[in-house]
Image (tube, coloured by chain):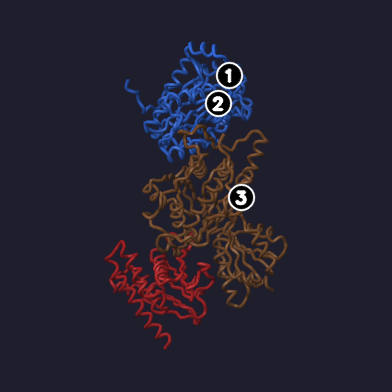
């Protein structure tokens, strides 16, 4: 039997986005930052299938990875991609794919198997409009898919939501760290605006990248070598009691991962109203908050960085201090459900969102906040 | 065991034993099923080529879903049909590994056809052992992509009708046009002589990988007496009399060549 | 200090490049900057537009409802984005490409014969750089020096012979904008 995961009782995460990055400051496109971040984070192999609006990631990696002695393969489909991740991850390698919404949907079956087999891997979703073929414009409508399952069975993924180019660079590395620490899949959930936007970020040149870390993964199916026992990567437990036990083990790991919760706040000290938003919405929300502040209105920003685990305690505390929270998302209302659960009726929670690829301007968000304040 | 018994054992020559690559767990397969034979053959090959320490096997979904219990090497349980994609990554992340998949006809030729064809087209250095018994065994006898015309299955109760569901897919014929394939052969498992042929094919399909030539695949014409509703011997006869007419045995691609003796 | 700029024209006129030069120069000045290209079916062959924002404070949204400055290089862009300049804002128009003028009286509209000026500077394709110069001539930010350095670093990396003509085009733009703003103000 494969070794099962016993989450290590380490202290809170050392994964930080504000660690001083090495490299030079330059304008970086979000998708390029993700690709560079993956390499800097020790990504040993990438498997993916082209889909707009994230194609820069596989395009860049297809050139870079072979030069660094790492593995890049354009798979025949997203279905194959995620199963290649499964194989590479089972063998102990840091494996990543990137895609956009419809492609991520195709990966959901494989993701469930990866989660079931307690394997670490990183998925980047540069979200586009849905459902169905939707369009290629920015969207945040895959929040549920990333945070609430997507595939079958009781599993969780850690979900990181960057909001600028620097975080786009740093989060793939954080994702690998977290994935390995808890032996579970980690999403970097971003969107078409952040993916195609240029911003200054401090990023290394290819020559400065460290080699992937050598990690001890005693459970990996590397081939037995000198090991006295075989390893098996598997999610099949035919005996109900065994599967129950396996699920409990998974849940114990997820409970451990709850301590990785991260969020960012602006102007909360005296805020009476708060805009809660992640990723690009938080950028627009931040502009709206700044506009309202200039008018003397006491408004703040709450930005979940981990969408799972969701910063529910912080929001619950905040709810006791403010008069209302506006959740702003590029969808028809997904994260707002978690906000409402966290707030639990303590203060009013309203929702403003646009789905389909329209990016509202800060004024639009500010107007909704003003209405709420009346 | 008493000391005098051991002394007796030492005097005897061992002529048959379980391959080292197999565990001592008893197979769960139905009487007359040929999975056990192919499991043993695969294990013999791992022993023969001394590959145990660097083998990673990829199991399918189907009757042989539990095969990781039977093998001593590292194993990965793939989702239905995706074993070639999993194996591709296992091999590419460390080309020193020996990687095989073991797949049935539903797994390889139906749901996993894309993964099969593309691994073959890429010439991924993996070895595929393909069990073709023309039926879905584990799920209860439904029609497979390799079910013969006229053959009854629980989803073709009056016999497979070509007009409705097409003709059986010959995987060897289909893959033989792809340049990434280095060895491709089909063999029935119906006689000791055929098993000897099977071993020959398997050696070459393994060498295709070890010698960096391309993908190797051996298709085993296999029985499913339970779902065919036949006695085991009748099932073997059915292969020799009927199945081989639709799926002719032979070598379809050989870029491996013979070893210099 | 924050400047939100929208640049629009036909694909191939160097719209996206102009925005990137501006964002890069702002970064060279130590400012925050964003550049965001337009999306949608017009991406290929048709119109192109992008937004550049630079600020001495952290930037939130990379787009806005109305802009401090809109630079247009064709007539459809003027029709579409002319209304998006804030009151008292700046509208820079490539007059060689825009025959019908803007009727707004609540903005400063500067007409620049960008193509002929670029041709005179020895690089016909640098109409975008002339317009960028015009923007600098009026706004004073990003610094001319930073824009020149960006041109040296980015253009010069692949085509060093194009550095001088581009720098010249930039200066021509700066000069004409200053002349024409003083004319507007007079």
Q: Please name the residue that numbered disc 3 is placed on.
A: A256
Q: How crowded is mark 1: few (under 14 residues within 10 Å), some or many (20 or more)?
A: many
**Which one is closest to the eye, mark 3 or mark 2?**
3
Residue A127 is at least partly visible in this image: no
User: Of label 2 and label 1, which has the lower sequence position?
Assistant: 1
Q: Please name the residue that numbered disc 2 is placed on.
A: B134
Q: Note the chain letter of the red one.
A: C
Q: Residues within 10 Å of mark 2 (few under 14, many from 20)?
A: many
Which chain contains the residue that carries disc 2? B
Quote the CA–CA distance across marks 2 and 1: 15 Å
Is C106 drawn above or below residue A216 in the view shown?
Answer: below
Residue A242 placed where, x, y %?
Answer: 65, 36
Check disc 2 and report its element: helix, strand or loop.
loop
Which chain contains the residue that carries disc 1? B
Q: Which residue is drawn at 45% across and 26% down?
A: B46
In the rendered image of this protein, which colour is used for chain A?
brown
Q: Which of C12 and C57 is in front in this view?
A: C57
**Which one is closest to the eye, mark 3 or mark 1?**
3
Q: Nearer the viewer, residue A283 or B76?
A: B76
Q: Please name the residue that numbered disc 1 is placed on.
A: B32
């Amino acid at each position: 039997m494969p070794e099962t995961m016993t989450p290590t009782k380490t202290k809170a995460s050392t994964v930080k986005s504000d660690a001083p990055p090495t490299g030079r400051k330059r304008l970086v496109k979000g998708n390029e930052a993700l690709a560079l971040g993956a390499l800097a984070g020790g990504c040993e192999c990438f498997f993916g299938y082209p889909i707009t609006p994230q194609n820069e990631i596989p395009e860049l990696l297809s050139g870079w990875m072979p030069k660094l002695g790492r593995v890049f393969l354009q798979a025949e489909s997203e279905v194959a991609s995620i199963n290649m991740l499964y194989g590479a991850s089972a063998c102990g390698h840091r494996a990543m794919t990137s895609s956009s919404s419809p492609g991520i949907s195709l990966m959901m079956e494989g993701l469930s198997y990866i989660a079931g087999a307690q394997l670490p891997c990183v998925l980047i979703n540069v979200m586009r409009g849905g459902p169905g073929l939707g369009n290629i414009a920015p969207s945040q409508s895959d929040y549920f898919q990333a945070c609430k399952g997507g595939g079958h069975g009781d599993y969780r993924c850690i979900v990181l939501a960057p909001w600028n180019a620097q975080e786009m660079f740093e989060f793939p590395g954080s994702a690998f760290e977290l994935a390995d620490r808890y032996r579970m899949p980690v999403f970097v959930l971003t969107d078409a605006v952040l993916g195609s936007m240029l911003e200054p970020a401090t990023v290394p040149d290819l020559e400065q990248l460290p080699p992937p870390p050598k990690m001890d993964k005693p459970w990996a199916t590397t081939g037995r070598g000198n090991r006295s026992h075989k390893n098996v990567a598997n999610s099949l437990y035919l005996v109900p009691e065994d599967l129950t036990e396996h699920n409990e083990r998974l849940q114990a790991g997820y409970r451990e991962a709850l301590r990785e919760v991260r969020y960012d706040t602006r102007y909360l000290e005296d805020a009476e109203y708060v805009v809660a938003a992640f990723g690009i919405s938080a950028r627009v929300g931040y502009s709206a908050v700044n506009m309202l502040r200039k008018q003397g209105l006491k408004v703040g920003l709450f930005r979940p960085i981990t969408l799972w685990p969701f910063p529910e305690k912080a929001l619950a505390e905040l709810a006791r201090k403010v008069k209302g929270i506006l959740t702003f998302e590029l969808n028809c209302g997904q994260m707002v459900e978690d906000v409402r659960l966290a707030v639990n009726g303590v203060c009013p929670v309203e929702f403003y969102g646009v789905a389909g690829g329209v990016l509202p301007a800060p004024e639009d968000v500010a107007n909704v906040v003003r209405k709420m304040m009346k | 065991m008493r000391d005098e018994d051991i002394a007796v054992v030492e005097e005897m020559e061992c002529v048959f034993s379980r391959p080292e690559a197999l565990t001592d767990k008893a197979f769960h397969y139905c009487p007359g099923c040929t999975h056990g034979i192919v499991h043993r053959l695969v294990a013999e090959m791992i022993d023969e080529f001394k590959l145990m320490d660097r083998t990673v096997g990829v199991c399918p979904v189907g009757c042989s879903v539990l095969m990781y219990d039977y093998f001593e090497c590292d194993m990965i349980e793939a989702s239905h049909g995706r074993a070639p994609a999993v194996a591709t990554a296992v091999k590419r992340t460390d080309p020193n590994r020996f990687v095989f998949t073991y797949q049935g006809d539903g797994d390889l030729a139906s749901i996993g056809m894309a993964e099969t064809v593309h691994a073959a087209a890429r010439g991924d250095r993996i070895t595929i052992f393909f069990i073709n018994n023309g039926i879905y065994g584990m799920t209860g006898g439904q029609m497979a992509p390799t079910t013969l015309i006229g053959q009854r299955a629980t989803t073709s109760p009056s016999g497979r009708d070509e007009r409705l569901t097409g003709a059986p897919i010959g995987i060897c014929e289909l893959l033989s046009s792809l340049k990434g394939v280095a060895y491709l052969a089909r063999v029935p498992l119906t006689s000791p002589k055929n098993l000897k042929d099977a071993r020959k094919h398997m050696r070459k399909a393994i060498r295709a990988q070890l010698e960096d030539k391309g993908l190797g695949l051996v298709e085993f014409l296999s029985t499913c007496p339970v779902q065919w509703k036949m006695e085991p011997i009748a099932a073997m006869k059915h292969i020799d009399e009927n199945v081989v007419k639709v799926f002719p045995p032979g070598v379809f691609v050989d870029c491996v060549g013979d070893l210099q003796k | 200090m924050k400047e939100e700029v929208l640049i629009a024209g036909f694909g191939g006129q160097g719209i996206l490049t102009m925005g990137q030069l501006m964002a890069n120069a702002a970064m060279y000045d130590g400012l925050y900057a964003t550049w965001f290209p337009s999306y949608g079916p017009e991406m290929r062959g048709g119109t192109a537009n992008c937004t550049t924002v630079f600020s001495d404070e952290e930037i939130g949204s990379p787009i806005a409802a109305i802009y401090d400055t809109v630079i247009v290089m064709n007539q459809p862009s003027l029709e579409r984005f002319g209304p998006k300049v804030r009151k008292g804002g700046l509208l820079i128009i490539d007059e060689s490409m825009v025959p019908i003028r803007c009727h707004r009286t609540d903005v400063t509209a500067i007409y620049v014969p960008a193509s002929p000026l670029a041709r005179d500077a020895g690089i016909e394709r640098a109409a975008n750089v002339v317009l960028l110069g015009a923007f600098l001539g009026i706004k004073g930010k990003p610094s001319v020096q930073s824009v020149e350095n960006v041109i040296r670093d980015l253009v010069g990396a692949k085509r060093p012979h194009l550095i001088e003509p581009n720098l010249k085009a930039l200066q021509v733009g700066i000069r004409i904008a200053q002349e024409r703003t003083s004319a507007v103000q007079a």
